[in-house]
Amino acid sequence: MDKVRITQVRSIIKRPKDQKLTVKALGLRKINHSVEKNATPQIMGMVRKVAHLVKVEQV
């Protein structure tokens, strides 16, 4: 299964609650924090929801 590295690049301050919860569910804590996840349809859907706050790259 493919892996992706997700990096938070923008703040979640003044964002809707569902976007804040999605970023937290991805395991991101602060700006420039990165996590590696399997590229499942569920994870990619979460990434699309907060695409303006994160950077995604293939690993």
Image (spheres, rainbow, N blue to C red):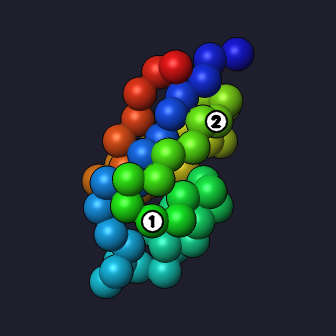
Residue 44 vertical placement versus 28 (above, below) = above
Res. 30 mark: 1
Residue 40 location (% of width, % of height): 66, 31
Res. 40 mark: none
Q: Residue at x 60, y 23 (%)?
A: 3
Tell me the mark number nearer the camera, choosing from 1 and 2. Answer: 1
Label 1 residue SS? loop
Res. 37 mark: 2
Type of amino acid at the residue the image marks with label 1: Lys
Residue 52 location (% of width, % of height): 29, 53
Residue 11 occupies quadrant: bottom left
Q: Relative to 6, is 13 on the left or the right?
A: left
Type of amino acid at the residue the image marks with label 2: Lys
Alpha carbons under labels 1 and 2: distance apart: 17 Å
Residue 6 vertical placement versus 49 (above, below) = above
The residue lying toward the viewer, choosing from 45 and 39, is 39
Query: Which is more N-terminal, label 2 or label 1?
Result: 1
Q: Relative to 26, is 14 on the left or the right?
A: left
The quarter in which the N terminus is drawn is top right
Q: Mark 2 packing: few (<14 Cα in 10 Å), some, or many (20+)?
A: some
Residue 54 vertical placement versus 29 (above, below) = above
